[in-house]
Image (cartoon, rainbow, N blue to C red):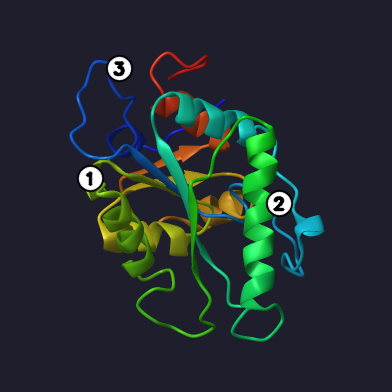
Amino acid sequence: MPVGNEAGDAALTVLDAGTRHSAMKLILLDRDGVVVVNRPTNIKQPADLDLLDGVAQAIRLMNDAGFTVSICTNQPEVARGVISPAQLDRIHHALQHRLRQEGASIDRVFSCTSSVKCPRRKPAGRMVREAMEHYGARASETPFVGDQLDDLRAAFHAGCRRVLVRTGLGSRTLAGGIPDYLKPVAVCDDLLAVAHRLVPGASGRL
């Protein structure tokens, strides 16, 4: 069952089905630990992709409610020469194809391939802002879902609503404490729990 922290309801309110949105309804996700299983050696080929339980259903619920869903992910293995940009593209195309087969759509994957600190690399906020600008979405209405403090920091710097899932490294992140400046942060068990909180009428909505 989804669990919210003290300020969680302020970060992730259930959207009113009757509310009119003049901007794009957008949800941004981290990749590893939110959508796919974290691998200690990282994902180097499409065969390494394993969807976390409930992810396809969660994204399908979001899509059906009119949300565009995209990913913002750090992928420094490219800069380190472990994989090529073409290999990364194949991984992301395979991920999108896998989800489409289950009726779910990831519209676009935004990646920062730098291995050093830069304005696009999370925890900086430029990649997240670029995603919102691409779609014409409002930061105040856009949740960013991650499993690490750097995800929350990137969302904070971009002005997004901050959501932490317990999957991936999320439970460890929560146990380590969330800095006050990042709050409010909504905490959910997994991406399906996020969908239940965001989508009006979804089964299990909080």
Residue that carries the numbered disc 3 in the rendered image: 17
Residue that carries the numbered disc 2 in the rendered image: 37
Viewer can see residue 2: no
Please give the name of the residue rendered at 40% of the width and 28% of the height, measured from the top-left corner: 198
Q: CA distance from mark 3 to mark 1?
A: 18 Å
Q: Amino acid at mark 3?
A: Ala
Residue 84 at x, y percent in the picture: 67, 78
Please give the name of the residue rendered at 62% of the width and 36% of the height, measured from the top-left corner: 55
Residue 73 at x, y percent in the picture: 52, 62
For the view shown, which residue lies furthest in the right direction? 47
Using the rendered view, name the quadrant where residue 93 is placed: bottom right
| Relative side of 17 to 103, left or right | left
Task: Determine whether 18 is above or below 189 in the image.
Answer: above
Please give the name of the residue rendered at 43% of the width and 73% of the height, measured from the top-left corner: 121
Residue that carries the numbered disc 1 in the rendered image: 140
| Relative side of 22 to 74, left or right | left
Residue 7 at x, y percent in the picture: 32, 38
